[in-house]
Amino acid sequence: MLDILVENLGRINFGPYLLENKKGITQGVLFDGQELKGLADVLPSFQRYRCCAEDRGRGRYSDAPVIRRGIFYLRELGDAYLDMSDWGKGVVWVNGHNLGRYWSVGPQQTIYVPGEWLKPGNNEIVVLELVKPQRDVLRGIDKPLLSWGNGRY
């Protein structure tokens, strides 16, 4: 099995190369100097939740990026924040809505969750974690945490 992760960390937003700003896999993929064939058929069929940090039920964890999925129950709705201060770097979705990226380098340590994207009862959360795959607990809070270095504001 081959997993390919392409991360987009920036863009060209001015100048003569604006329209040439290509991202992702734009040509063939090489493995050990050989072009892999058939990727055009494989890439569009990516399954959203197929990644797992646990090493196929053996109880060991790898350092590969993971997708964590969970359900949380709400009786009342309102705006909230997710405390990402113990996580590394990644992206969060709630009920199919992309909330944004997080990164432990700060200064933002929380992700805002608009109450409009939540619903009474079960809500789904999905986290793509790139650098700390062992993380599996996420805490909701009512105020943002902002920090830079060791201090919290």
Image (cartoon, rainbow, N blue to C red):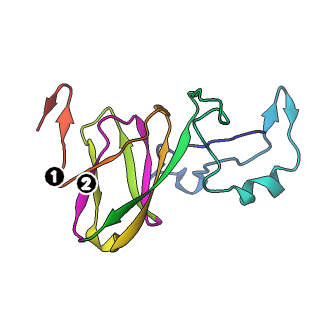
Asked whether, in this view, residue 128 is left or right of residue 29, the answer is: left
Q: Are marks 2 and 1 in contact (CB under 8 Å)?
A: yes
Asked whether, in this view, residue 107 is left or right of residue 45, the answer is: left
Q: Position of residue 127 (x, y in %)?
A: 46, 49
Which sits in the foreground, 64 or 120? 120
**Could you give the CA–CA distance between mark 2 and mark 1, rounded to whole angstroms?**
6 Å
Q: Amino acid at mark 1?
A: Lys
Q: Is residue 30 above or below residue 11?
A: above
* Label 1: which secondary element: loop
Asked if residue 87 lies in the magenta stretch, the reply is yes
Q: Position of residue 4 (x, y in %)?
A: 68, 41
Residue 81 badge = 2
Q: Which residue is mark 1?
A: 143
Which callout, 2 or 1, points at the residue further toward the start of the chain? 2
Q: Amino acid at mark 2?
A: Tyr
Quadrant of the frame with the C terminus: top left
In this picture, which residue range is highlighted in magenta? 76-96
Which sits in the foreground, 53 or 48? 53
Q: Residue at x 85, y 40 (%)?
A: 36
Q: Is residue 93 above or below residue 149?
A: below
Q: Residue at x 54, y 46 (%)?
A: 67
Q: Position of residue 10 (x, y in %)?
A: 46, 45
Determine which quarter of the picture holds residue 72: bottom left
Quadrant of the frame with the N terminus: top right
Asked if residue 85 lies in the magenta stretch, the reply is yes
Label 2: how many residues lie within 10 Å, few (<14), some (14-19) or many (20+)?
some
| Residue at far left of view | 153
